[in-house]
Amino acid sequence: METWKVIYNRYEAEKEKLREALCVLGNGYFATRGAFECCNADEIHYPGTYLAGGYNRLTTQVAGKEIENEDLVNFPNWLPLKFKIEDGDWITPENIKIESYKAEVHLKNGVLKRKLRFTDSKNRKTEWRSERIVSMTHKHRAAIKWELNALNWEGNIQIQSALDATVINSGVERYGELNNKHLETLDKGITPNNNIFIKVITNQSRVVMAQAARTYFYSNNKKINPEIHNIEENEFIAQNFHLKLQKNIPLQVEKHVSLFTSKDEAISEPLLEAKEELEKMNTFAELAKDQINSWEALWDQNDIEITSENIEDQLVLRFHVFHILQTYSANSVSMDTGIPARGWHGEAYRGHIFWDEMFTFPLFNISSPEISRSLLLYRYRRLPAARLAAKKAGFKGAMFPWQSGSNGREENQVIHLNPESGQWNPDNTYLQRHVNAAISYNVWTYFETTGDLEFLSFHGAEMMLEIAHFWSKKCHFSEEKNRYEIHQIVGPDEYHTQYPDCEDLGLKNNAYTNIMAVWSLDHALQALEKLDDLRVKHLLSQLDISTEELERWKNITQKMYVPFIENSGVIEQFEGFDKLEDLDWGKYQQKHGENMRLDRILGAEGDQVNKYKAVKQADVLMLFYLFSAEQIKDLLHKLGYDFDPKKHIPENIEYYRKITSHGSTLSQLVHSWVYARQDRSKSWHNFKKALMSDIKDVQGGTTPEGIHLGAMAGTINLIQECYTGMDFRKDALYFQPKLPDDLKNIKFRLRYLQHWIELELDSDCLRLKNNGNWHKEIRIFVRTKKFIFKPFEEKTILYNNL
């Protein structure tokens, strides 16, 4: 099996939308689904082109309510390229007999290729090859190359090349009742050089996009100038080319496209720029050469080599890296965009940014820290909106939204369609304030990995302090418990948004949220210790944080309430969770399988998941994902709770394992992580489930709407940090290696405090090579042994002997 190509050897119409999501090509600026160039949106196909951060808001009357949603806009389709023979129908995969088929995503160079042989209704046999590039080198460019070969016939053909702005947002069926036409056409036409162009604007956010395209033809290495018929409709511009195809003499077709928007920097006007950029483009071959060079540089920095029992593991791991790099790259850094939960691969979650961006930071922190910095600046620029949200809710500090889009307001849906029941229900998951803690966590881990004190001083510490200020005011002191509490909250689980038979929203004392609030407060105080005294003075004055307030923070970090299940070491998911009803798991797993959306299933039965001890995804277990056993022990001991990691972590894992439905792709990877120190075979078993979750669409139809970027990033993190035991804290780099039996070897590069380090790990040996930097020597701990690692030094450490 190839480890650099994802290959499909059969055309299967029922899987086409899944493959379109998995075959997306992007460059961090825009992305286009892997649909056939000849196909429009229908039940089988869904072409889509998405601009990073390209949002628009529309209002709809639904279930008696007027609701406004901000969507990731499906911008004009630049792909359309189709052909027909003589006076026949336009060729599509559905109206021909496909004799052989192969589609390949070339991960090494970011190219999508197809090759098929087919027979039409008149028994004419044709070979059809295509290649597609969305340029990583030139972010405004894309291109398609076709080769058509008449195998047993010759005759006239017609080829149409178009730009199509008739597109709407219809990629997610459950959004079907919502308004979905986001574009108005401003201009279209043909340039004096016979290029086509179209210019559109989003009807609320007023983002302008211009596209320009030209189409070339070659045969026997000679350029052909065919007869052209131009087609102009309201939102559509096309050219029909009339050519003759000779038997066994291939015809090459190249379509070059340029794309600009009003959000771009250093431009005059999008259409002018698109036209000029098109004139700079040469051949497909030259664009492909640049593409190879750009992706080679990306892979040199980001590739992860593994040796395992199944070579497919290596392929899919690279596939995940590939999609992360296509979603956010160096092209994204100046764009003021976050990293969306479902990539720019489809319309699920509307391209919004959630807490699961935290799963992508570990990769970027050690490979491209400038990307991590850019993602954090996306949050920093929305700090004023978070402050306003906190103020409106009656708090101080910053309350970041559960779903973020263009300007930092809360983009969570007011009501949400249950596709199992067909009913619209209130969506109260916005009460997941733990997104605040995730942002603080991302700031701190970025700082610990990079040592970027400038960012911490001018941006990061301000966010951490404002988030801590929010937690301080969100907490209230219980005289009865003699502890601080947090009410009206929802944890990562999402199944439970209120207590059964209770009208009040939210829960009391979600353990994950309470502990993460403590961590946020403690690390905001640690951030102050890193800063210059004058900067601290100015920050505290600017944010109106008094000495008394800082003392309150310290007190909360010692007296926060964490619920435990009685007579056990099991951390209770939230106060009262253990009093909920037991669910008949056998009944539902037999009918729906292991990965279930119980909220939808029970809702369709007239029941509610709030009543049951049932978990969608890891909630309490996220604590053991983010923190080492030593760290969680220290956190809880500081709060006055007796917690023995060796005894109580396995107890917690086993308790929640039995009641988790894995209704989220994040769930399996978190379970894999927490098993890594307890049961390596189970850890690898769950890792494989997480690894294959998108490529096999284990959630049953969700991946066609957009990949699950957090889960993809999490599988990378499992290899790079979990199984190596790599951690960044206390100004040192730590390793606690423990490989599963199925994983024989890991190799990758990482950047720590400006040092580029090559790492190789097997079952007994850790090899490190420092490629040098101007930075001073660094401290490394393997197990408990300390090493000083100097620039250009190499070390081989037999870690089982330590």
Image: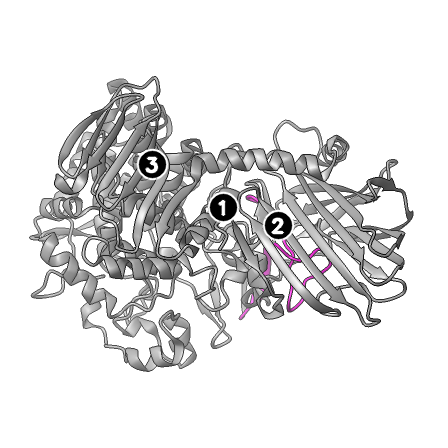
Q: CA distance from mark 1 to mark 3?
A: 24 Å
Return the x and y of residue 586 as percentages of the image width and height: 29, 80
Q: Earlier in the sequence, mark 2 or mark 3?
A: 2
Confirm whether the magenta stretch covers residue 749: no
Nearer the observer: mark 1 or 3; the answer is: 1
Question: What span is colored magenta in the figure?
Answer: 34-63
Residue 482 drawn above or below residue 383: below
Q: From the viewer's perspective, tell me whether residue 401 is left or right of residue 335.
A: left
Residue positioned 47% across, 77% down in the render: 421
Q: Are marks 2 and 1 in contact (CB under 8 Å)?
A: no
Which kind of residue does numbered mark 2 sit on?
A: Leu
Identity of the residue drawn at 90% across and 46% down: 226
> Magenta stretch containing residue 59, yes or no?
yes
Is there CB contact under 8 Å for labels 2 and 3? no
- Give the number of callouts: 3
Query: Would you say the residues marked 1 and 3 are in contact, meaning their CB atoms lie under 8 Å apart?
Result: no
Q: Please state which of residues 392 and 277 is positioned toward the viewer in this rendering.
A: 277
- Closer-to-camera residue (277/73): 277
Name which quarter of the figure residue 278 lies in. top right
- Compare marks 1 and 3 and give the one earlier in the sequence: 1
Q: Which mark is residue 466?
A: none
Mark 2, secondary structure of its residue? strand
Crowdedness of circle 3 by 10 Å Cα count: few (<14), some, many (20+)? many
Residue behind mark 1: 322
The amino acid at mark 1 is: Phe
What number is the disc on residue 443? Answer: 3
Q: What crowding class fits label 1: few (fewer than 14 Cα within 10 Å), some (14-19), or many (20 or more)?
A: many
